[in-house]
Image (spheres, coloured by chain):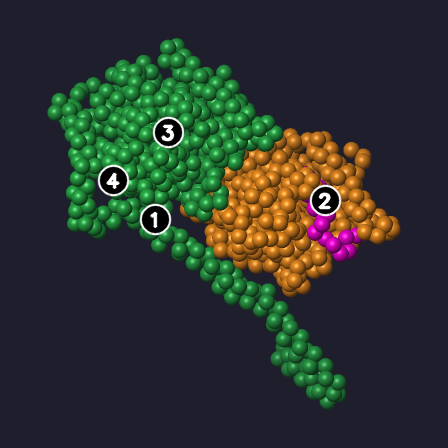
Chain colours: A orange, B green
Amino acid sequence: MNFPILTSLILLPAIGSFFIFFVKFNKNYQSSKYVALFISLANFVLALYLWSIFDNSSSEFQFIEEKKWIQGYFNYKVGIDGISILFIILTTFITPLCIISVNSTVTKRLKDFLIAILLMETLMIGVFCSLDLILFYLFFEGGLIPMFLIIGIWGGERRVYSAFKFFLYTLLGSVLMLVAIITIYWMTGTTDVEKLYQIGIDYNYQKLLWLAFFSSFAVKTPMWPFHTWLPDAHVEAPTAGSVLLAAILLKMAGYGFIRFSLGLFPLASEYFIPLVFTLSLIAIVYTSLVALMQEDMKKLIAYSSVAHMGFVTLGIFTLTQQGLVGSIFQMISHGLISAALFLCVGVVYERMHTRLINKYGGVVSVMPKYAIVFMIFTLGALGLPGTTGFVGEFLILLAAFKKSFLVAIIASLGVIFGAAYMLWLYRRIIFGEIKNADVKKLFDLKKHEIVILWSIAVPSIFFGFYPQPLIVTVDVSVINLLEMYNNNLKTFLVNK
Amino acid sequence: MEYIILFLPLLASFVAGFFGKLIGERNSEIITSLSVSITAILSIIIFYNVVTQDYNNNIVIASWIKSGSLEINWAINIDALSSVMLVVVTLISSIVHIYSIGYMSHDPHKPRFMAFLSLFTFAMLTLVTSDNFLQLFFGWEGVGLCSYFLIGFWFKRESANAAAIKAFLVNRVGDFGLALGIFLIFYLFGTINYDEVFKLIPTILDEKINFLSFDFNSIDLICILLFIGAMGKSAQIILHTWLPDAMEGPTPVSALIHAATMVTAGVFLVVRCSPIYEFSELALSIVTIVGIVTAIFAASVALVQNDIKKIIAYSTCSQLGYMFFATGVGAYNVAMFHLFTHAFFKALLFLGSGSVIHSFNDEQDINKMGGVKKILPYTYILMIIGTLALTGFPFLSGFYSKDAIIEFAYLKGDYLGYFAASAGVFTALLTSIYSWRLIFKTFHGSYNNTKQPIESVHESPMVMIIPLIILAIGSILGGILFKDLFIGQESSYVFWKSSIKFLDPLSIDHPPIWFIILTPALVIISIPISFYLFVKNKNVTKVLIEQNRPFYLFLKNKWYFDEFYEFIFIKPLKFLGYLFWKKVDGSIIDKFGPDGISKIIKNFSIKAVKFQSGFIYQYAFVMLLGFSLLLTLLILD
């Protein structure tokens, strides 16, 4: 494989953003949007091509590219396995949809907005490809900057407060991660992930290092009690920003847990299982109840994201095949469904300029097409069998049940609450008599909205009925990861 | 053929749902009704094949989820049990489809309605033809979803929306149990395929399992968890509150989903899992007790309700209780028989009441009816047939199935069996009284509606009456024709075979003759008594109510279940949600977390700014301070 396909994937959006930055467009920048759309679509096609030539049956990292960067210290090294590729596909799939949705939500500085989105894409693909800790850190933290700008510039009224809250929270966690990475370098002399997997990290330091990584990932996931930045960030972010945030940014942490926490610090991971379980369960139950009481649609969905990510962290730390596959599946599913839900909110927000649930009601009478797609995603979010939401939750709960009955029972409560807040939200917006005169003036979905929403609806139903393509892609990598994990534990016990 | 049965309703649903506007209302109605009718005919053929040729088939359509040792398929599994369910579901469904053409004729959203009915049929079929627990769960949630849509079909009515959500959520509580049951099965056996699980059951008979620090027998625990799911779907006491509210949906929906098919899914589940339940004495006792209590509870509430549909809804609840205690005493086939006959006469009663409501221009209060038996002759006669069948009047279908349940309970021979049998007799009496109360108040006596003149009451169109006639034929003949097949002494070897497991062969004794006669006698006697109470001399009931006011209110308010739940679940949960949001998130986490930190930094930086005062003596002082501190440290070392 001579063609540097991963580097191309990473760089293509960045090149596109440079292009948009330097080329002059006509006044309203509409053509810059087409350029951005074209580039992101090309990247999606490239990602699909990558998937098609990806070897499911191999447990090795594939398409590895390695370049010397800072001589003797660390290298530019990228490569993927079955876990990363799904997130790459998700990223490249969601980005063009975001760009289409920009149509009417962003009125000022469209060009800059597109540049931010494309840069985001570059950084996020970079996160999922990196096989070097420093490189990972750069991409991981770099992703903060465009997001910070998106919220800070194109956000709502309290955008500055939210942007700073977002930035502070996530940066504080990350500083600790950086310290941990440097420590690892001093201990082992390398930041190459593959090599680190082989060398293993001194057992005495694992717990501290694990906590340092955890502090970063827990904030980004977000896990309870580090979650309060998320509702604020979502509420203020423009639709496209919320979509990227929910669909992809949050997944970087889940990915990080799998790739680094489990891979590098198996002993510490095993040790901290109770902590993660406790926080996950609190997240599931607590945020579900909070979601139930929300009056702002976006806040409701933001809180539900926290609950859903609680399932993800729960699944990862069951450390079983079903749990891990379920978690990855849940992340992809949540990436699709939460993205779509934010887009759905965006659709009516654009028309009514309010996110307060009680201003709506009876929308189905004027927007029947909207009611249908919104219903599909509502059902996906509450985990109805036949949607992707179910497969992930089911596998995670199945795995959790193996670990502990009590954990599975409490987590299952989240499924009941999930149905409650989603259906109640839907009812208050869509059903009932029209009480607000503004609702009467609403018009149904426009063409580009139909395209966006249905192109998310189709995969979220298809993979609900036939999840096999996704499961097969991650299976071998997950088995391999678990094998490595268990071997590490064993050697430790033997040495002891 | 199986593929057609399963997918034709789905296809029809898609066509009517997405292209309803394009092809027109009438075509949507025809396409859905025709499709479901075809599946009904095919189902009857399959049932016939099963009966005559021992037809059995397990078709794997596709692989669904495969991860590690977990392997789940989409499948169509045909055996005696599923063939019975196929017939019940598709037959009632096709009748309801046709009836709906008339009943919903003034509704602007007909294609959507028909699409949901067909979709429901599809979901119910995937439920009954599953060969594993997960596809069952898929169908289980699927029918729940369609039920949600159809209860809330008139989406402008707040009460309909509330009822729809309530139905979904209460069912979710049940599903919670079912899901945990499935997890436990996978945990114990590593598979969730019926056949494989059922084969492995005898290997874990004495296995104990620690569940929430209690030691349970694993099989008991599986059965109890599955039964929680069954209680939700089949509206058994504790999880029954959604069913009466579900009457907010259009009446054909009540007939199909909330009487004949979906609510019997719980009974089906227990019968399907008979190879597990047979090994759990404890679970069977629980099933029996829940069944008994529900039967009595629901019948007692039905006595005093005034909404025609709610009376029938409680009656359904009560009859489902019968089915459960039949399974509890090990008479699974009798439970299935009652499920089969009940589908006909209960659908008949619901559709009949729909015809009444239609005739009275959407009036549902039986106090505002009366004196119309001559104006609505067909409906009247058909309702009478339904009532006779329900109450178990000799030689109609309910007589064979319900009395068989009572007899088998008696033959169980232990205390629980005798208790169940006497509860069955008592409930049969209550059933008879509330059913005749409904008939007499609706059709007899004088016309009581002040809002609309009697002339405005009109008989329903033939498209509604003919489906009723078909159901009436089923209600009359269903018992006598199929009793040998379903509950004959040889039925377990001849018909049910491996689809139902009987650990001990069914008793072939007969209860004493006085006991056999007791139920029909009570049922017959109660007809003139009811006539006297509700038509001839209404003062008797009035006095009775006045004298026992608290008891009357207790029944009238459905034993205060809704109020109780509001008090112990809904309000506290909402309160907790509010508390977590405002107090914990807002006042604790944010205050001490990000906002607190940024405040500290801000204060600190303000102080730091003040520090740069520009006065040299201040700087010199600080330098001196630092220098002496350093010096001290060096000396101390």
The disc at residue A286 is none
User: Magenta includes A172?
Assistant: no
Q: Within the image, what quadrant is residue B378 found in?
A: top left
Residue on which the image places disc 2? A100
Picture residue at 49% right of the left edge, 28% below the top? B118
Q: Are marks 4 and 2 on the same chain?
A: no
Task: From the image, state whether disc 3 or disc 4 is nearer to you.
Answer: 3
- Segment tinted magenta in the rendering: A84-111
Q: Residue B592 location in percent, x, y?
A: 55, 67
Task: Specify whether A144 is left or right of A466.
Answer: right
| Crowd around label 2: few <14 · some 14–19 · many ≥20 (10 Å) | some
Could you give the CA–CA distance between mark 1 and mark 2, rounded to whole angstroms? Answer: 48 Å
Task: Calculate the distance from the C-alpha at mark 1 to the C-alpha at mark 3.
Answer: 36 Å
Q: Is residue B407 visible?
A: yes
| Position above or below: A309 against A55 | below
* Lower position in the chain sequence, tag 3 or tag 4: 4
Please name the amino acid that badge 1 sits on: Asp
Q: Are marks 4 and 1 in contact (CB under 8 Å)?
A: no
Q: CA distance from mark 2 to mark 3?
A: 57 Å
Question: Which amino acid is tagged 3?
Answer: Glu
Which residue does the image show at 32% across and 41% down from the upper left? B449
Tell me residue B407's x, y (percent): 20, 25
Q: Pointer 1: what residue?
A: B562
Real-space CA distance between mark 4 and mark 1, rounded to the nearest whole angstrom: 18 Å
Q: Horizontal placement of B531 versus B286: left or right? A: left
